[in-house]
Amino acid sequence: MTDQVKKLAPEIWKVIENATRILLHFHPNPDPDSVGSALAMAHALRGLGKTVTVIKGDSPMPEYLSFLPGYETITPKSYLEIDPTEFDLFLMLDISQPNRVTALGEVKFPSTLKTILIDHHISAEPFAELNLIAPEYPATAQILYDLFSEWGIKLTAEISACLFMGIHSDTGGFKYQGTTKDTFLAVATLVVLAPNFTDLVFQMENNKSPAQLRYEGLALSSIELVGGGRVALVVLSQAQLATAGIRYEDIQGMGIANHLKSVTGWEIGATLIESMPGVVRASFRTRDAKRFDLSKIAVALGGGGHPAAAGAVLKMMVTEARELVLKNLLQSYDGLST
Ligand SMILES: [Mn+2]
């Protein structure tokens, strides 16, 4: 546990203790760290007698995580579809910027709503009243594990399953750089309480649809090498996806960029996928985060993320997005040539 988490734990606890109606949400395109963290927090807070609402946020319900305990309690609304004055605390987890609350409109917090941010993204902005930003942690779920321990919250099977999935996912199954001995120590405790963890992982990793496999094929056959052969780039337009019978909602979070950087010499994997006309989702992954800190290019493009994994949403045509990303890649990093 870092000194910062230890120091802020009692301050956050004080705000939670005084709150009665607490709001939680998922970030757009929610990953298991977003969903697992919010559901784990919801279980913990309900155990304390709090009234908790978890909204799904901007994206459709994350059905691929429907096996997580508490999934059935999710309210299928975005932040713009609720009345925030009905809550006295908004606990924002695993998000780095207000546009991760909602990107569908302006984010306004009523003066009666206390706000707390708990996140592990290096690019996180402290936009809440109380901010715990801990980039030393590989997952928000692992920060929550430490907070729950500081708060004396008894871990249940439900909490443990949710935290486990968040940590497992954001560490790439305990193999990304941010994974530490503390990750394993936390997980050792969690799997005692959630002994079905291999079933959870199986359910998450083996539920692909035919469209997803077709998308993998399309993406892998569209690879072009740029930046002197060190950047593997996949650019797909709405028209290409439509021709192949692929809807964006079927393929979000597929992680093709991760796949690209698995080739020796392809230092950066980048995907630019047009999710709807004029909206391009850029995703970046690298084999060498020390040389290619991807949060740099993501921030330059108005997005965010981690040194090894980052992304941005570009509101422009896919051809313009390609030019902009190429320009920024060459500007951001030495050793890439045209
Ligand atoms: Mn996360």
Image: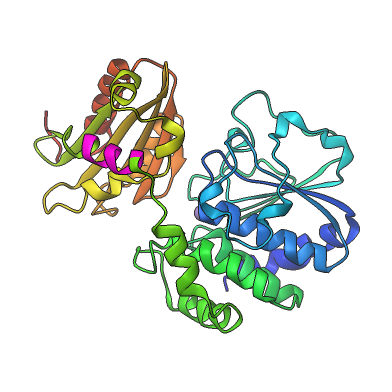
What range of the chain is rendered magenta? 211-218
Residue 10: give x, y in percent of width and height: 77, 67
Q: Is residue 6 visible?
A: no
Residue 213 counted in the magenta span: yes
Colour scheme in use? rainbow
Q: Residue at x 73, y 43 (%)?
A: 75
Quarter of the figure that contains the C terminus? top left
Q: Is residue 176 visible?
A: yes
Q: Is residue 99 left or right of residue 326?
A: right
Q: How many marks?
A: 0
**Relative to the observer, which residue lies in front, 189 or 266?**
189
Q: Residue at x 46, y 62 (%)?
A: 203
Q: Residue at x 54, y 77 (%)?
A: 186
Residue 92: give x, y in percent of width and height: 68, 48
Figure quadrant of residue 169:
bottom left
Q: Is residue 242 left or right of residue 120?
A: left
Q: What predominant SS class does the magenta segment belong to?
A: helix
The correct choice, above or below, for 177 with respect to 274 in the image is below
Q: Is residue 224 left or right of residue 187?
A: left
Q: Outermost residue, front direction?
A: 210
Residue 122: give x, y in percent of width and height: 48, 50
Q: Residue at x 66, y 40 (%)?
A: 127
Residue 303: give x, y in percent of width and height: 46, 34
Residue 304 counted in the magenta span: no
The correct choice, above or below, for 123 with respect to 326 in the image is below
Figure quadrant of residue 125:
top right
**Relative to the observer, which residue lies in front, 334 or 46?**
46
